[in-house]
Image (tube, rainbow, N blue to C red):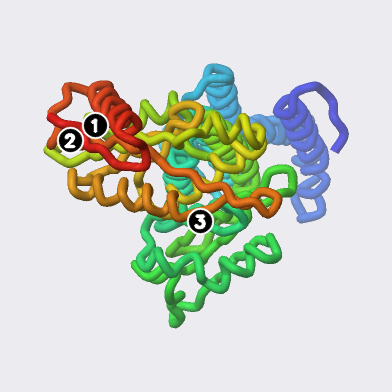
Amino acid sequence: MARITKKVFNDLALWMMGFGLLVGVIFPFFMSLLGVSNTITHALWFRFACIFAGLLVGLVNITLAKRVVEKRLKTLASHMGDIESRLGEISGKNEPIDCDNLTCHITVDSADAIGDSAIAFNRLVDTIASSLKMEMNLRAYTQMLSKHLDTEALCRNALETFLVDFRSESGAIFVIRGGDLSLIEAKGISEKSNLIHNALIQEVMIDEQDRILTLPDAIKLEGVLTKYRPRQVLIKPIKYKQIMLGILLLGKAEEFEASKISMLDIFCNGLGLALHNAITYDQVQRLAALDSLTSFYNRRFGLIRLREEFVRAVSNDGFLGLIMFDIDHFKQVNDTYGHPVGDKLLKQIANITRSVVRDGDILVRYGGDEFLITLVGASHTDTLEIAEQLRRATSESRLLINNQAIQVTLSIGVVSYPNNRCENEIDLIDSADHALYIAKDSGRNQVIAATE
C-alpha cells in the first residue's frame, strides 16, 4: 500500500476515511438497486448522510485500531528502550542484566502478527540476557585463569567453573606430563583410578579429536561416570598452538545445549593458554630449585624444604633425620683427573644416594662436594641405617675413566630430631656439620652421629 505520510497510523486514518467517503458516495446507488425510491436515494440530504456515515465509520475504525494495536506497539517500543538503557548501564561492567520475565518480557495475548512480534521480542531478550551472562562468566573465568600458575590449583578452579557454567554433574581434567596422561582434578566421578584407562579417553589421547557420546536411557557408562547415569558425555582435548596439553571430560544428566557446546571451544582455548603458562612456570620453578649437575635441590631451596619439614616435625611431635656428607679427598680427584671427571663422580654419588634413600626424602647439594639429606619421619636409628647404607654403597662402587677405576669414600655426619634437641633447622645443620668434621678428623669413611 502506498505511503502518504511518515506515520503509519496517519496513513491508516487517511485510507480508512477515504474508504468511508467512497462507501458514502456509492451507498445511495446501491440502495436504488435494492428498490428504494429514487426520491430518497437522490435526495441531497440522504447523500450527505451516507457520506457522513462512511466518514464516521472510518473514524471509529482508526480509533479502535489505535487503541488496540498502537497500545501494544508502544509497549513493545517501551520495553525495547528499557532494554537498551539497561544494556548501556552495564556495558563494560561485570554485572548481570537486571531482567526477568516480569520486567522484560511482553505479555503474549494474541495469536496473530502482534503476538508473534511479542514472542520474538521475548526470545530476543532471553538470548541477549544469556549472551551477557555467558560473556560475564567468560570474563570471570579469564580473570580466574590469570591468577593461577600452579597447575593443580588452575585445574581445580577451572573444573569448578566448567561444572557451574555448563551445568554438568561431573567432570575431570587430565594433563600430559612426560608423555603420560595424569588425572589432576575430578568431581562427581567414582573409580577415578580407572578413569585414565577408559577407551574413550585413550582414543582422544591418540587422535586428539572431540568426543560427544549420547547414551540411551538403558545404557550406563561403566568405569567413567558411575555416581549417576549420564545422558551425554563430552570429551575434549585441551590444546595450545595445536599441541595437546590435556583432556577435559564433562558429564551431564541431560544433553548439552548447542550454544554451550559452541562456547566450550572458547573456554578450552583459554584453559590451554593458562595451562601452557602453568606448565612453563612449573618447569622454570623446578629448574630454579635444582642443581643442574646432580638434579638435587640447590642450597637455597633445600634449606627452605628443611625448614618446612622441621616445623612440621615440631608441630606434630614427629621425627626428622638429617645426613650431611662429603667426598673424601675430592680435591685430589679434581687435581689428578680434571674437573670433568670430578663432575662425573658427583653424578655417580648422586645416583648412589637416590638408590639408598626413600621416596619423599629431600636431597640437597649443599655446596661443592658437600650434600644434605633430609629424612622425613625418620627416627635416629633409621637415619643411622640409611647413612651406613650410603657409606657402604659408595665405598663398594667404582668410577671407570679410561679403563682406570676410581674409588672414593664418604665422611658422614648424622643428627636427628627429637633425639638431638635443636631449636631450629640451623641447629640441626650445625650439629650435622660438627659430626661430619669429627668423621673426617677421625680417619674418614665413617658415620658419626651428633651427640646431644
| Most foreground residue, 156 or 262 | 156
The answer to whether the residue labelled 1 contacts the one labelled 2, judged by CB atoms less than 8 Å apart, is yes
The image position of residue 286, as x and y in percent, is 53, 35
Q: Nearer the viewer, mark 3 or mark 2?
A: 2
The image position of residue 172, as x and y in percent, is 47, 55
Mark 2 closeness class: few <14, some 14–19, many ≥20 residues within 10 Å? many
Amino acid type of the residue tagged 2 in the rendering: Tyr
Amino acid type of the residue tagged 3 in the rendering: Ser
> Does residue 7 appear left or right of residue 85 in this picture?
right
Q: Nearer the viewer, mark 1 or mark 3?
A: 1
| Most foreground residue, 402 or 247 | 402
Please say if 233 is above or below 395: below
Which residue is the site of mark 2?
Answer: 417
| Most foreground residue, 269 or 128 | 269
* Mark sitting earlier along the chain (1/3): 3
> How far apart are the alpha carbons under marks 1 and 3?
31 Å
Which residue is the site of mark 1?
Answer: 310
* Mark sitting earlier along the chain (1/2): 1
The answer to whether the residue labelled 1 contacts the one labelled 3, judged by CB atoms less than 8 Å apart, is no
Q: Quadrant of the C terminus?
A: top left
Q: Nearer the viewer, mark 1 or mark 2?
A: 2
**Residue in the image at 58% along x and 37% along y:** 293
- In what element is the residue under mark 1? helix
Please say if 336 is above or below 232: above
The image position of residue 346, as x and y in percent, is 54, 40
Which residue is the site of mark 3?
Answer: 182
Q: Quadrant of the N terminus?
A: top right
